[in-house]
Amino acid sequence: MDPAELKTTVDMAMLEMDERHIAALEGAVQQMLEYFTTMSSIDVENVEPTTHALVTSNRVRPDQNERAVDPDTLLENAADLEDRLIAIPNVL
């Protein structure tokens, strides 16, 4: 990546970086671009897509019907109520 492009990107991201940090970022960006070039040369034509690199099957559990909790029972256990609504103290 051209140093002028990198400085423009830093400005567009509204980052404040001195020349030392920009030089370090330039090295990291160059390393990433080289990695992307390596990745683009890999043949993935017959590779099946996955949701995760290490998972070979989806981790989904079957839907199960469960008994619903009675709203009145829940409200009886609330510390403070306001017109059948659970009152929560202000945090801020």
Image: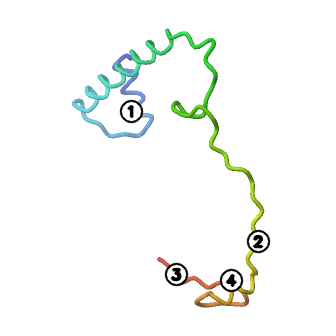
Which circle's residue, 4 or 2, is located before the other in the chain?
A: 2
Which circle's residue, 4 or 1, is located before the other in the chain?
A: 1
Which circle's residue, 3 or 2, is located before the other in the chain?
A: 2
What amino acid is at disc 4?
A: Leu
| Distance from Cα at disc 3 to Cα at disc 2 | 32 Å
Q: Which mark is residue 40?
A: none
Q: Which mark is residue 74?
A: 4
CA neighbours of label 1 inside 10 A, class few (<14), some (14 to 19), many (20+): some
Give the percent coordinates (x, y) of residue 79: 58, 89
What amino acid is at disc 1?
A: Val
Which residue is located at x 63 percent, y 88 percent?
Answer: 77
| Distance from Cα at disc 4 to Cα at disc 3 | 21 Å
Q: Is residue 57 left or right of residue 7?
A: right
Identify the residue position indicated by label 3 in the image.
90
Compare residues 75 and 89 and report the one nearer the observer. Answer: 75
What amino acid is at disc 3?
A: Asn
Identify the residue position indicated by label 2 in the image.
67
Which residue is located at x 34 percent, y 20 percent?
Answer: 31
Q: Which one is closest to the eye, mark 1 or mark 2?
A: 2
Q: Which one is closest to the eye, mark 4 or mark 3?
A: 4
Q: Which one is closest to the eye, mark 4 or mark 1?
A: 4
Give the percent coordinates (x, y) of residue 74: 68, 83
Which residue is located at x 37 percent, y 39 percent?
Answer: 15
Which residue is located at x 76 percent, y 73 percent?
Answer: 68
Residue sitting at the far left: 20
Quadrant of res 45: top right
For the N terminus, the image quarter is top left
Identify the residue position indicated by label 1 in the image.
10
